[in-house]
Structure formats: structure tokens, C-alpha cells
Image: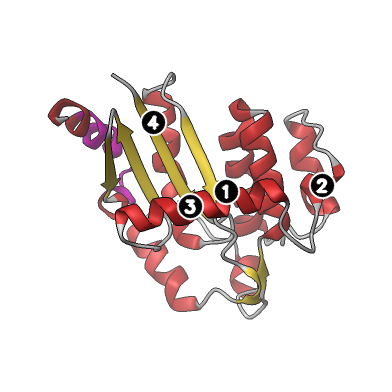
Amino acid sequence: MSSELFFIYDSHCPWSYAATPLVKNIASAYPKMPIHLMHCAYYDGDNKVDLSTVKAVKELSGVPFGQDYLNSLSDNKDSTLAANLLTWVQHKSNKHALDLLIAMQKAHFESANDLTDKDDVQPLIDSLKLSPPAKALKIEKLTKDAEFTFHDISELQEVIGTNAIPALLLAHNDTLILLNHNLYLENPEKIVEAINTELKSH
């Protein structure tokens, strides 16, 4: 039997930030399960995060938001560089992909790091001893790899019938299961029980 996990997210999306601990728990419980982190690059520099979204995330999850981030909600968010970098890491150094995502989300949501230029992400890259090429640090447009990921996401969203993010998908043999991540935001460890149930039933 073969199982894989697909996490469709945006690094600058508060709901994705709240769902990442679920992915971390799954990765810990199933160290051999391939996990595909798929950045959808929703935030393109022309959209913001509204306060009501942050309040809802805080009510339903335990993820922290720094005051500087809360003060920056009126600023447009741009995840282009993050999408390029995280897509490169997913393809070239998969074992570091989740760690980098977690570090970037912590920097963004707790310390108001915009993650929009090389200087913003260089300390995070260095901490994981990564050496991304210049193309992975583009800020003006998506790389070809990031665009390919975006197309793959579109195909998955067509199958599951929603383009909402984040989305956690469990692929088991020939079955694709959309996990209801909202049920586990307050207790991320509970997602493992849900995975176990799904695997047993399929």
C-alpha cells in the first residue's frame, strides 16, 4: 500500500499557518510518508490579510501572531519569493522543506518579516545550510518550477472540487481523500488519529 500527503498552502496565509502544525504532526507520525508541500502563490502583492481572518484563526488554533504583524495588516502581502524558494527546496532538498516553511511562517507571523527580498530570507536559508540558486530568490515573478506547481495544484483542486486554501489531501493507493483540517486546528496531534482511521478504512 502506498500513501502520500499533499499540503496546498500559501506561506503568507494565516489559515495555512494554522494548518502547518498538522503537517508537522503527520510527518512525525509517518516519517516514511512522502509529503508534498505545494505553495499556491495566492498573495501576489495586491492583496491583504484582514483582521477578521486573523481573529478567526486565533480563536480556532494556538498559533501566535506578533504585534508587529498585526500592525502590518494594512500592507499588501506578496509571497512570490517565498513560493519560489519553498518550491525549490521541495524539489531539491525535500528533507528541509517543512523546516523551512515553519521557520518562514514564524518569521512572518511572529516577527512581521515580509519575506519579500533576499535579505529577509537569508538567515533562514543559512540556518538550514541551504544554497538556493539565484532563480529561487526571484521577487518579481514565479519561477517555472513554481508555475508548474501552480498547475498541479489546479488539477488537484479540480478533482477535490474546491480551490480553498489550505487543503490537506491524503492519497492512499488510488484514493484521494480531502481531510477536514479545521477539526484539528486546536489539537494538531489529533490529525494523526484521523489519518489512521482513513488508512484503515481504505
- How many angstroms separate mark 4 from mark 3 (CA)? 15 Å
Give residue 176's position: percent from left, percent from top: 29, 41
Percent x, y of residue 175: 25, 36
For this orientation, the residue located farthest to the left is: 201
Tell me the CA gap for discs 1 and 3. 6 Å
Q: Secondary structure at mark 3?
A: helix
Label 2 to label 1: alpha-carbon separation: 15 Å
- Residue on which disc 3 sits: 153
Q: Amino acid at mark 1?
A: Thr
Residue mark closest to the camera, 1 vs 4:
1
Q: Which residue is mark 2?
A: 135
The reply to whether the magenta stretch includes residue 112 is no
The crowding category of the residue bearing disc 3, from other C-alpha atoms within 10 Å (few below 14, some 14 to 19, many at least 20), is many
Q: Are marks 2 and 3 in contact (CB under 8 Å)?
A: no
What stretch of residues is rendered in magenta? Answer: 184-196
> Looking at the picture, how far across and down is residue 11, in whole percent?
58, 54
Residue named by callout 4: 4
Report helix, strand or loop for mark 2.
Answer: helix
Q: Which residue is mark 1?
A: 149
The residue lying toward the viewer, choosing from 92 and 130, is: 92
Q: Residue at x 77, y 31 (%)?
A: 130
Q: Secondary structure at mark 4?
A: strand
In the displayed structure, does residue 61 sit left or right of residue 196? right
Q: Are marks 1 and 3 in contact (CB under 8 Å)?
A: yes
Going by the numbered disc 3, the residue's amino acid type is Ile
